[in-house]
């Protein structure tokens, strides 16, 4: 469909319940930067979570999985812009919360698959109306 999807599990990018990119996550994004800079594709960053509700400890920061997935997507976008100099007009964030799982959420391994950020490369001009 003219798109390329790169799936990065949350444990690579973030601590549990956090949207702050880890040092190892920055290394992964740094490896992608040259490819992202040298292409004309637009970049959609999608945030996903599992179906476990945000616990009381985190509710003051993220009211729900919607907020967590959005904050994670926008953290990646901010990093790509700040560190890689990628034009903001080429990027967009999308938040899916728990509603687009790739695993059944029936086990810890399934839930781990669902906690992810997906970087989608789409044809240039995809975000224009």
Image (tube, grey):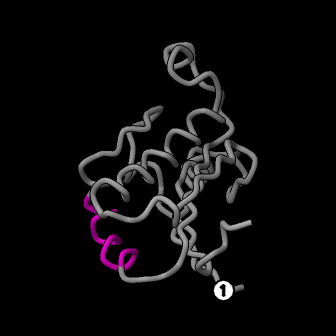
Query: To which residue does mark 1 refer?
Result: 2
Q: Is residue 84 above or below residue 79?
A: below
Residue 17 is situated, as x and y percent measured from the top left of the image, at 47, 32
Q: What residue sits 37% from the left and 59% below the top? A: 80
Pick the front one: 54 or 91: 91
> What is the quadrant of residue 39 in the picture?
bottom left
- Number of numbered tags placed on the structure image: 1
Q: Is residue 53 left or right of residue 23?
A: right
For the record, the magenta segment spans 27-37
Q: In this view, does 62 lie above or below 47?
A: above
Q: Is residue 86 above or below residue 117?
A: below
Label 1 crowd bin: few (<14), some (14–19), many (20+), radius 10 Å:
few
Q: What residue sits 36% from the left and 38% below the top? A: 20
Q: What residue sits 51% from the left and 38% below the top? A: 71
Q: What residue sits 41% from the left and 48% below the top? A: 11
Residue 97 is situated, as x and y percent measured from the top left of the image, at 67, 42
Residue 15 is situated, as x and y percent measured from the top left of the image, at 38, 38
Q: Does the magenta stretch include residue 64?
A: no
Predominant SS along the magenta part: helix
Q: Does the magenta stretch include residue 34?
A: yes
Q: In this view, does 83 lie above or below 65?
A: below
In what element is the residue under mark 1?
loop
Q: In this view, does 15 lie to the left or right of 113?
A: left
Residue 45 is situated, as x and y percent measured from the top left of the image, at 55, 58
Q: Is residue 15 left or right of residue 55?
A: left
Q: Residue furthest front?
A: 129
Q: In which quarter of the image is the N terminus?
A: bottom right
Q: Quadrant of the C terminus?
A: bottom right
Pick the front one: 86 or 33: 86
């Amino acid at each position: 469909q003219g798109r390329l999807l790169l799936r990065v599990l949350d444990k690579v990018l973030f601590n549990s319940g956090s949207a702050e990119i880890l040092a190892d996550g920055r290394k992964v994004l740094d490896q992608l930067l040259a490819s992202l800079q040298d292409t004309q594709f637009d970049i959609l960053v999608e945030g996903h979570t599992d179906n476990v509700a945000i616990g009381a400890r985190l509710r003051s920061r993220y009211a729900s999985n919607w907020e967590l997935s959005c904050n994670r997507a926008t953290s990646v976008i901010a990093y790509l812009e700040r560190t890689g100099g990628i034009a903001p007009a080429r990027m967009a964030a999308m938040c899916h919360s728990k509603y687009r799982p790739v695993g059944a959420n029936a086990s810890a391994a399934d839930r781990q698959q669902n906690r992810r950020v997906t970087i989608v490369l789409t044809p240039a001009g995809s975000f224009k109306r």
